[in-house]
Amino acid sequence: MVLLKGNEGKRHKITVNGHEIDAVVSIEYAYEDYTPTAPNDFDYGDAKENAKYAARFRDGGDLSNVMVTVTVRAKGLEGVDHLGGCHIRDSHFETDIMDVVSQYEMISIASKELRKNIIEAALELRSFLKPGPRGGGHYV
């Protein structure tokens, strides 16, 4: 995986049970081996157009097939969203990846997973706490 330049450690606020948490977002990509086939991967309704589009992925072509991964981290936990099979124009690589992240709401999905993971961890760790003296506070 390669970290997308300019997106290292972007700050993102999420709210968990009324508490605002400062999270860090990273956006990564990995090239996927790919031999496109129509109509499985795309279909322009014409064999000639399909062949023309498929050729854009070969050596010297202007398209790459990548997997995009968004990770949101906070409090030692993370939420992740992956999307493979993204056809990205080499000449607009970073812009196209950010368009995929936006269009498929990947930061939101990864944030929801992080929120779920924080709540699950808190509930699991609750069993380690004992009531403090006279019912006040908690201690381990």
Image (cartoon, rainbow, N blue to C red):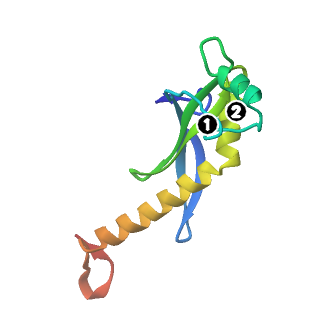
What is the number of callouts on the image?
A: 2
Q: Residue furthest bottom?
A: 134
On the rendered image, what quadrant is the C terminus found in?
bottom left
The three-letter amino acid code for the residue at tag 1 is Cys
Percent of width and height locating residue 102: 69, 45
Task: Please say if 53 is above or below 16.
Answer: above
* Precedes in sequence: disc 1 or disc 2: 1
**Nearest the camera: 104 or 133?**
104
**Nearest the camera: 19 or 124?**
124
Badge 2 crowding class, 10 Å Cα cut-off, few under 14, some 14 to 19, many 20 or more, is some
Q: Residue at x 57, y 63 (%)?
A: 15
Percent of width and height locating residue 3: 52, 29
Task: Please say if 79 is above or below 33.
Answer: below
Position of 78 compared to 98: left or right?
left
Q: Residue at x 26, y 74 (%)?
A: 129
Q: Residue furthest top?
A: 60
Percent of width and height locating residue 68: 55, 38
The three-letter amino acid code for the residue at tag 2 is Asp
Cβ atoms under marks 1 and 2 closer than 8 Å: yes
Q: How far apart are marks 1 and 2 (CA)?
A: 9 Å
Q: Quadrant of residue 65?
A: top right
Percent of width and height locating residue 61: 66, 16
Label 1 sits on residue: 86
Q: Is mark 2 on a helix, strand or loop?
A: helix
Q: Which residue is drawn at 35% across and 72% down?
A: 123
Q: Tell me, yes or no, if residue 67 can be seen here.
A: yes
Label 2 sits on residue: 96
**Nearest the camera: 33 or 9?**
33
Q: Residue at x 69, y 19 (%)?
A: 62
